[in-house]
Amino acid sequence: MNMTLNELCDRIRKSPRSIRTDSRKVEVGDIFVALPPAAREGSGAPDLRSDYIRSAKAQGAGVIVADPRFAAGSDNGTEGASPEFIPVADARSALGQLAAARWGTEHLNFPVIAVTGTNGKTTCAYLLEHAWRSSGRKAGVLGTVSYRWPGHEEEAPLTTPGCLDIHERLAAMRDAGVDVAVMEVSSHALDQKRIAGVEFSGALFTNLTQDHLDYHDGMEDYFSAKRKLFTTVPRADKVMAINADDPYGLRLLEQLPHAVPFGLNLTSARPAAGLACTVLSDTPRGMELRLTWQGKSWFLSTPLVGRHNAANLSAVIALGLQMGFQPGDFSCFHEFCGVSGRLERIPTPKSGKGANVGIFVDYAHTPDALTRAQEALRDAGFSRIITVFGCGGDRDRTKRPLMGKSVARGSDVAVLTSDNPRTEDPESIMDDVMPGLAGAGEIHREADRRKALTLALDLARSGDAVLVAGKGHEPYQIIGNVKYPFSDQQILKE
């Protein structure tokens, strides 16, 4: 009689053993979980699970966990004892269950908060981390910039790590004594069930705009992946904050009567139950906000600029209020100056060349994020907006003219350049962008990103803002399959 998944979990709790999803890394006695191909990745490619299972057996796997159709592959007549085979209907969910048992993350003694949306995830994660730390508590973060907790920080290869990595890192956070974990959750991670086995106490939805359509089959499919965080991922009693200014957020709110809406235009979606934010002033020095919650209002000053940052602050406050924070606790944001590569201000000389020019680096790499960044600088009162931008290679081509259109509408001067061209020809990528730039006031085209940055600074006059978009915190440029050192911030400072 086959061992069940629950019985295997019991064994792992008593005697931890390695779990693998890569058959090449299997060692004697390991548990191998044969995952199906990720949805829409490698469309038309063969399903190689049988090969992987045979390989895992040859490496000495003690247990194979897979779809029951592959049971025969675990006992194929090769030498050596056959591993135990555990049939599961959903290997990705099973992996989460096994990982939680292996790392003891089934019932954590701290809340785990998920942040999802196209734009704003990283800023919201930093704001949540700052709020907890300002209240004297320890925070851990898994996000786009890094995976970090007290005593540890590493560069993040993925916005959301793989399932086994998530549970191992949550266990490390527990051992470091964190009081909260904040996780940026991408649509890829939701689609691939990388967060299986994690019980979130809170979930935040920032917005949904066009991105990742090289992976998702249209916007509805993209939204469907995001929606899973709120409708199918445990726990059912988690607190939720959802952007009521976003049309997809409104659709979520219709499904989730207990979720708290937030917004700058909170007129629909249960305004009495939500957090309303009014931007009273927006200048190059920062913003003044009025926040209203449950009939009470208070004011918040922030050095951040732009309505998108007002929305990010609203999102975090709406979630924080549900998790025990009081309005006065958010005074910690008075001195919060922003996040690396998120409308990050580069210091300029007080006199001479560059004086009175605002230079900003932003991760905006979607049409919507680019529009928001330009609007933020326009609203803050700069004379002209000069935008340096490009589009990544081997990624969604349909958004390239839309990026150009955003800059044509939102900037006075467009400087089109390279942004991680990968295996594509930079000139071809720029050709795809050019139709969207039709009608732009002034257009410059320079494939060499360093020269493009120099050009933009040469064009800038007193009172102008230079926006360098696309790469944000990234300290590299991907050309071919190689990452070359390249930091927009460092070059601009030079």
Image: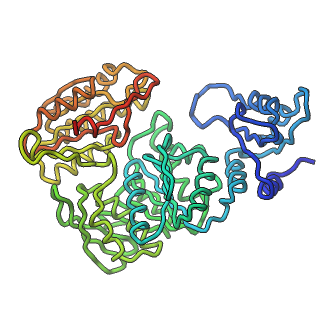
338 sits to left or right of 176:
left
Where residue 280 appears, x then y in whole percent? 19, 66
User: Who is closer to the viewer here, 133 or 404?
Assistant: 133
Where residue 351 appears, x then y in whole percent? 6, 45
Q: What residue is drawn where x is 23% and y is 56%?
A: 305
69 sits to left or right of 140:
right
Q: Please tell me whether residue 48 is drawn above or below residue 147 in the rendered image.
A: above
154 sits to left or right of 64:
left
> Quarter-wise, where is residue 135 in the image?
bottom left
Where residue 215 appears, x then y in whole percent? 50, 35
> Quarter-wise, where is residue 10 in the image?
bottom right
Residue that sits furthest to the right in the current view: 1
State the quadrant of the C terminus: top left
Q: Please tell me whether residue 273 is drawn above or below residue 115 in the rendered image.
A: below
Question: Is residue 383 at all visible to an observer of this figure?
Answer: no
378 sits to left or right of 309:
left
Q: Please tell me whether residue 458 is drawn above or below residue 68 in the rendered image.
A: above
Residue that sits furthest to the bottom in the current view: 295
Residue that sits furthest to the front in the current view: 151
Q: What residue is drawn where x is 91% and y is 27%?
A: 79
User: Who is closer to the viewer here, 150 or 478?
Assistant: 150
How is the structure coloured here? rainbow
> Quarter-wise, where is residue 462 in the image?
top left
Q: What residue is drawn where x is 73% and y is 38%?
A: 34
Where residue 452 appears, x then y in whole percent? 22, 28
Q: What residue is drawn where x is 66% and y is 65%?
A: 107
**How many discs mark residues in the rendered view?**
0
Question: Is residue 471 at all visible to an observer of this figure?
Answer: yes
